[in-house]
Image (cartoon, rainbow, N blue to C red):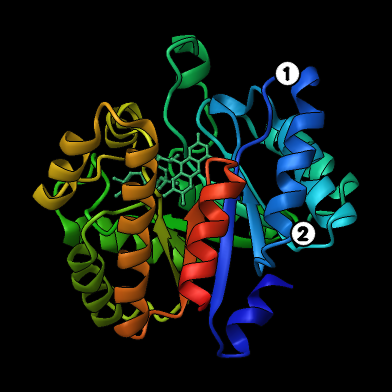
Amino acid sequence: MIQDLFRAGGQSLSFEVSPPKTEEEFESAYGKLTQLAALSPDFFSVTYGAGGSRSRNTAQIASYIQNTLHVPTLAHMTCVGSKKDDILRVVEELKAAGIGHVLALRGDRPSWMPEEQFLGRDFAHASDLTRFLKENTNLHLAGACYPEKHYEAASMEEDIAHLKEKVEAGAEFLITQLFFDNNFFYRFLEKVRRAGITLPICAGLMPITTAQQIGTTVHLSGSSVPKAFADLVAVHADDKEGMRRAGTEYAIRQILDLKAHGVMHIHLYTMNRPRTTREIVEAIRA
Ligand code: FAD
């Protein structure tokens, strides 16, 4: 079980991957996952399409990783626009796939979701989904947290108070939104611990390997970009391999600094990229 890793008190390294969007892409996805599994992560997490549009793909990929590649796997699940029955259907898909761990998320309303569906949702927040899953299933649950606060929260204090509700609802460990400046994580950790949240927290890091990726990532995550990193992107904007290497080295420096500060759990947003992930793993395990 994934939470046994944390109980054992050691370090952990986990990988986030995304399921393919179409049937034709599964074979190539399996190849990449096999290469990622060869790097011996402690667990994988598999993302979930906005509004549950491709929940079966999440279950299929999670099942492949856990049952064929034999690495414990956490399936993401969102509840925006979902009814209880929709969630129970996804729970059945995961059960059939042998998946016992879920990252319970609210999600964001996708542009295609009709207002009627959005307003008719049964769960307003991730803590409501967490409570429902805790009361109605045997799943082990994790939750998301935000070192720079969630973009909707009026203040960090308010966001942490809501995080506490998620923990009380049944989350057993937390994974952070990605960040490029470790100081945000250190300050967040201090505040979270002061608020009485003692759960293991995996620090989420994403290597930025293309200049375009930074626009999408910053837009989706709300994470701020430190000047040192913006300069690096500007220098390598027209040099594809140079940008990939510089982004990889930036992530390595971030992880080594986290480890030097005693951070035990690293979660890599791999973007399903075995080569960059391998370079990071080799550098941080050396
Ligand atoms: P919540 O915990 O519900 O928080 C959302 C906002 O509501 C926060 O501002 C919080 O302070 C506030 N809030 C919480 N409870 C209350 C309350 N009782 N009253 C008032 N306000 C409240 N998205 C996907 O679509 N698929 C994925 O696979 C996916 N994976 C992710 C993995 C990680 C590690 C992270 C960090 C994010 C992921 N996301 C994913 C994005 C996520 O869905 C969004 O960040 C979303 O906006 C918030 O989800 P949440 O679960 O943190 O929501």
Percent x, y for residue 217?
A: 34, 35
**Amino acid at pointer 1:** Thr
| Mark carried by residue 22 | 1
Q: Residue 183 occupies which quadrant of the picture? A: bottom left
The reply to whether residue 88 is in sight is no
Q: Position of residue 42 (x, y in %)?
A: 66, 70
Q: Relative to 63, say whether 23 is above or below.
A: above
Residue displayed at 40% across by 62% down = 165
Tell me what residue is drawn at x 31 percent, y 66 percent: 253
Residue 222 in the image, given as x and y percentages of width and height: 25, 40
For this view, does 70 lie left or right of residue 173? right
Could you classify mark 2 by the number of other residues whose Cα lies within 10 Å: few (under 14), some (14-19), or many (20 or more)?
some
Q: Is mark 2 within 8 Å of ligand 1?
A: no
Q: In this picture, is 128 found above or below 124? A: below
Query: How many marks can you see?
Result: 2
**Disc 2 versus disc 1: nearer the observer:** 1
Decide which of tag 2 and tag 1 comes sooner along the chain.
1
Task: Provide the residue designation for mark 2.
Answer: 100
Image quarter (top left, top right, bottom left or bottom right) of the N terminus = bottom right
In the image shown, does 172 or 186 lie closer to the viewer? Answer: 186
Residue type beneath disc 2: Gly
Callout 2 secondary element: loop
Ligand 1, image quadrant it occupies? top left
Left or right, residue 54 beside residue 240: right
Q: Is residue 217 visible?
A: yes
Residues under labels 2 and 1: Cα distance? 25 Å
Q: Residues within 10 Å of mark 1 (few under 14, many from 20)?
A: few
Along the line of sight, the residue nearer the viewer: 117 or 36: 36
Name the one closer to the observer, 104 or 285: 285
| Position of 81 relative to 145 (above/below) | above
